[in-house]
Image (cartoon, helix red, strand yellow):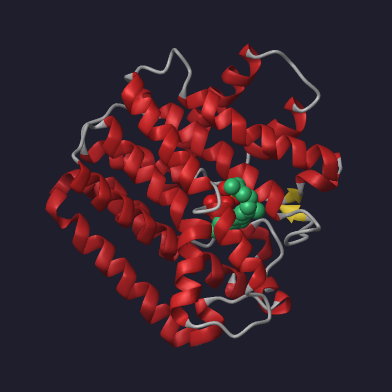
Amino acid sequence: MIKKKLIKNARKIDKFLINFLNKQKNSLLVKPMKYGVISGGKKIRSTIIFDTGKIFNISDNKLVNICAAVECIHSYSLIHDDLPCMDNDLIRRGKPSTHIKFGEASAVLAGSSLLTLAFEIITDKKYPINYISKNEIVRSLASCSGHTGIAGGQELDLKFENKKKMINQIINMQKKKTGKLFNFCLYAVGVVANKNKIEKNFLSSLGEEIGLLFQLADDFLDNKGSKKLVGKPVKKDNKKGKSTLLNLLGEEKAYLYANNLKKKILRKLEKHGKKAKELISTIEFILERKF
Ligand code: GRG
């Protein structure tokens, strides 16, 4: 069931991105950009956006621009993350990383162009939401991506390598590196649904917790997953001396932490009753996933 949903959503977002790029002037960077963002990846962030939309009866056509923008930022971060100056990974999504295929300079430029494309997608005239909401979404996406979000988290991740860090420092780093984009996913749906400040703050922190759960599952996959299913080499975190909860707490305590976090997230969704059914099934998948 969940696999079908992921594939359907991924196709929808890929189609949107192909159309959007095809309507723009062509450039040498379109090929590495498409290579980095289209036909690859689970597009789980998009699925979470659509699932959250179901809670508030928001139709997919009001959310598809947000999904596409998020996938651009996410793919941008992966392209840059794989570079030799960062994690130096040669394989991503079962194929050569963008810099291996197109060279480092083109990968840097394609990644940066995906970042700016995200903002073009949100501010597109044809996107059928009002300008005030677009402004709020742009502001949130910028702060979740920059030094207070993904980029800041990545800096901490690199600085923490081969250092003994405390649990709260690791959680703070992972909430920024991975959690902030999930935070944005739920917050942005709250904006489209015209929710008040309290509800939007609730959605932000719930999103960040879902992101942390997703990162914990990513760390478990690095430790125990199959290279073929994950689409990239595994067992890298130990070799690189990465600070993760798994390395700090050990397997048993880290799984317990993740299960308690999942329960906490599901409890928070109880107030939405059956409307949260899809989001709940995606959260269950996050911890059970093999890819
Ligand atoms: C993008 C603002 C910005 C800066 C670049 C390099 C970097 C700074 C940030 C890297 C952040 C990073 C790589 C976080 C890891 C998040 C993560 C668990 C990625 C894997 O996500 P999946 O499993 O990937 O959703 P797929 O391939 O399915 O899309």
User: What residue do we see at 67% from left, 79% from top?
Assistant: 238
- Residue 186: x %, y % from top left: 34, 45
- Residue 19: x %, y % from top left: 58, 18
Residue 212 vertical position relative to residue 31 in the rendered view, above or below = below
User: What residue do we see at 27% from left, 62% from top?
Assistant: 265
Q: Residue 252 falls in which quadrant of the image? A: bottom left
Q: Is 207 in front, or is 223?
A: 207
Q: Is 7 in front, or is 103?
A: 103
Residue 146 vertical position relative to residue 163 in the rendered view, above or below = above
Q: Is 39 in front, or is 228?
A: 39
Residue 240 vertical position relative to residue 184 in the rendered view, above or below = below
| Res. 48 in view | no
In the displayed structure image, the side of residue 255 where residue 89 appears, left or right = right
User: What residue do we see at 47% from left, 45% from top?
Assistant: 143
Location of the C terminus (image quadrant): bottom right
User: What residue do we see at 42% from left, 79% from top?
Assistant: 255
Residue 226 vertical position relative to residue 69 in the rendered view, above or below = below
- Residue 127: x %, y % from top left: 41, 18
Q: Is 95 in front, or is 101?
A: 101
Numbered disc total: 0
In the displayed structure image, the side of residue 204 where residue 213 appears, left or right = right
